[in-house]
Amino acid sequence: MLNNDNSDKFFKENISEHLSSYTICIVTQNNTYMVIHKLDEENDTHLDIDKNNIYFFNTKEELTDILEEVFDDIHFPNNISLSYSTMGDANTDIISHGKYIFITKLIKGVYSKYEKKVKFDSAEYIIYDILAKKSDKELERLKLIASITDRILEETFKHIKIGYTELDIANLTQKCSNDIMKLYVGSNDIVSYDMAWENCPIVLTGQNLEKGGHSLPSDKKLQKGDTIYFDFGIKVDFKDNTSLYTDMQRMGYALKDQTVPKEVEKVFDTLVSAIEDGIDEMRPDIKGYEIDEIVRGKILKEGYPDYPHATGHPVGRNVHDIGAIISVRGSKRSKMKLVENGVYTLEPRINIPNGGSIEEMIQVTKYGGIPLCNTQKKLYIVK
């Protein structure tokens, strides 16, 4: 790990948030070594590691001498993994190109001095394995705020009226969020909340369901016979200065006649069935694309067009969190394996006018996936 002015958020979260000058953290199976600039010498008291493994430098020459000592202590490993991404993932693409050149040149100099050979690769898979899992405390909190998110959407649907614009519905969702979150802020260690992303929620109705899933709500009015699509989440801040996110989608229908048309029922039932099939197989070590093929395959088998996005993604510490992507085989991150107690979304989409989409948050266990809250089993009806 290389950290400078808190450029590495994982360093900040897992090592120290008090070191802001150029810092190198070397992690092995047995030990952790910190090489810290002397500007931060007074800030190392928060480090929970062996003080004998903490070194301070002021010049490049001092840094080189320290690295010689550390690499000698760990027997000059032939392979060193650095914090950069080979898959275009901003979560693990920590060091800049300039830092990569600087640190590899420095290390090669140390190795060549002692006629040692070294290769460099990405530490992304190590980071994924460590950080894709959620702790018991995080899972407990995520279950709570997922249930709150579901409650907000359920309450919103109760107040939607025919003739509301997509923007009206989005504003209604935010009002319901404020009303409901007042009941939770101050309890369960919750101190504040916000929308999970800018321009949240996304609301599309009727013909607009053919748009991309990230299209913004418009002044189109809800008409009888329209399906309704929500993409919504909240960010919740806790007393221990951590934040967690939800990301869920729900589908509704503005009733035109006495019953829901068969074509709308089929859209909804297909989405629910595809998600259920995917949840059943969400076990540790299954690859992301294998779940995608199950869920996406169900949509295609029913004769609907393909959707131009991933079937799911990690969620929790961010809306789009670190870990495997549930997507087509061509995606590099879809070849990664799901991890036990990782949390992922499933969000298949039927990308047609008056189509729909549902998104659930799922915990991976060795017995299959477990939804974090009640999944949508019935179509929300607006009268």
Image (cartoon, helix red, strand yellow):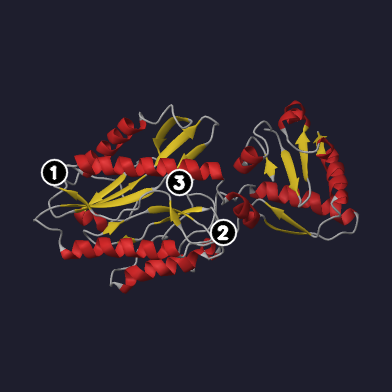
Q: Amino acid at mark 1?
A: Gly
- Whether 363 is drawn above or below 263: the answer is above
Residue 270 occupies quadrant? bottom left
Q: Residue at x 37, y 40 (%)?
A: 148
> Could you give the CA–CA distance between mark 3 and mark 2, rounded to whole angstroms?
19 Å
Judging by the rendered image, the residue that carries numbered circle 2 is 87
Q: Secondary structure at mark 1?
A: loop
In this rendering, position of residue 247 left or right of residue 136 = left
Spot occupied by residue 26 in the image (x, y as percentages of width and height): 75, 46
Q: Residue at x 64, y 33 (%)?
A: 17
Judging by the rendered image, the residue that carries numbered circle 3 is 319
Q: Residue at x 26, y 60 (%)?
A: 268
- Whether 233 is drawn above or below 29: the answer is above
Residue 166 occupies quadrant? top left
Marks 3 and 1 in Cβ contact (< 8 Å): no
* Mark closer to the observer (2, 1): 1
Q: Secondary structure at mark 3?
A: loop
Q: Amino acid at mark 2?
A: Met
Q: Residue at x 36, y 32 (%)?
A: 181
Q: Residue furthest left?
A: 257
In this rendering, position of residue 328 left or right of residue 227 = right
- Whether 291 is drawn above or below 359: the answer is below
Spot occupied by residue 47 in the image (x, y as percentages of width and height): 73, 34
Judging by the rendered image, the residue that carries numbered circle 1 is 163
